[in-house]
Amino acid sequence: MFQEATYRDLYDASVHLNWRIEDILGGDGSTLDFGRPFMPETFVRSAQLPFLSPAEKLTLNHIRAHGYLSMFGLVEEFILPFVLEHARSDLGDDSRNRALLNFAQEEAKHIELFRTFHREFVAGFGHACGFIGPADEISRAILGHEPLAVAIAVLGIEWMSQCHYLESVRDDQDLDPHFKSLLKHHWMEECQHARLDGLMLNELAARASPEDIARAVDGYFDIGGFFDAGLKSLAELDLASFETATGRALRGEDRSAFLSVQHQALRWTFLGSAMTNKQFLAALGALGGDARARVEGAAPMFS
């Protein structure tokens, strides 16, 4: 199967990279700079909304940054129990157990990091922003799928977060350094998580028949469709947040364009960028059958 690192390798690397939330938020009095963008334009696509002023485009950027981290907080709410359940499936390998339990601990830390960001964001932005939920209901819906389908979805999310930081965030000098540091620290630990997810996927796939794998890919698409519906709702919530923050109500064609552009931007951010990731596609190819081809074929609609 597609995977090079071992559980021991990944545990050792993670231990050396450990950081505290206080190192990023709330520990040194530094605050988010709302005079600068938080997110790369690649994910916001405000340039496609010429009816917005520069100040309004910056407000939209901040709203999208809030939704971006809220989404990661949401998915880690179901990744955490998924990892713990997988760890319990084989308690005989000490290196495996330590790596997976450390993985779960780091995901719990990330959830708290994003909650801390939310508090700092609201204090600086001046308005609370809506987000999809409740998180526990979404988690139950995702975890209701068979484990192999969930493992595929989780692996896509982990590799997606890697390419976001490396390809769009790291070298963007316009972004607020404080927010950029948060994304960097998240990426540092997610580097190990993506590879651990690959090991979990391999373990599940090794016990699966070709028919099981085909059903799991069906389940992955079901999970993607579920998220896509949520992303459409999030675009509507972002519009409401935008109107509250700016005091400007969009009407007619402007409103339709905002919703269309933002929904597609969200689809690319959280679905399309995973479905085109080389590492994710390589892992799908290693499953055999047409798993990779099916995902590559569906990716253009989320661009």
Image (cartoon, rainbow, N blue to C red):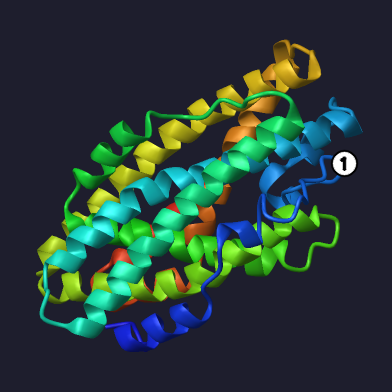
Q: Against 121, is 185 above or below?
A: below
**Residue found at x 67% / y 48%:** 43
Local crowd size for mark 1, using a 10 Å CA cut-off: few (<14), some (14–19), many (≥20): few
Q: Is residue 274 left or right of residue 118?
A: left
Q: Where in the figure is residue 187, as x and y percent of width and height?
A: 57, 66
Q: Against 3, is 303 above or below?
A: above
Mark 1 falls on what kind of element?
loop
Residue 287 seen anywhere in this rendered image of the structure: no
Q: Quadrant of residue 14?
A: bottom left
Q: Nearer the viewer, residue 131 or 207?
A: 131
Q: Quadrant of residue 210?
A: bottom left
Q: Where in the figure is residue 206, as x and y percent of width and height?
A: 15, 77
Which residue extends farthest front? Answer: 28
Q: Is residue 102 left or right of residue 201?
A: right
Q: Is residue 253 left or right of residue 86?
A: right
Residue 245 seen anywhere in this rendered image of the structure: yes
> On the rendered image, what quadrant is the N terminus found in?
bottom left
**Residue found at x 67% / y 55%:** 27
Q: Is residue 251 left or right of residue 221?
A: right
**Residue found at x 85% / y 46%:** 36
Q: Where in the figure is residue 142, as x and y percent of width and height?
A: 27, 43
Please state which amino acid type lies under the numbered disc 1: Gly
**Residue found at x 53% / y 61%:** 161
- Circle 1 is placed at which residue position? 35
Q: Where in the figure is residue 269, as x and y percent of width and height?
A: 57, 49
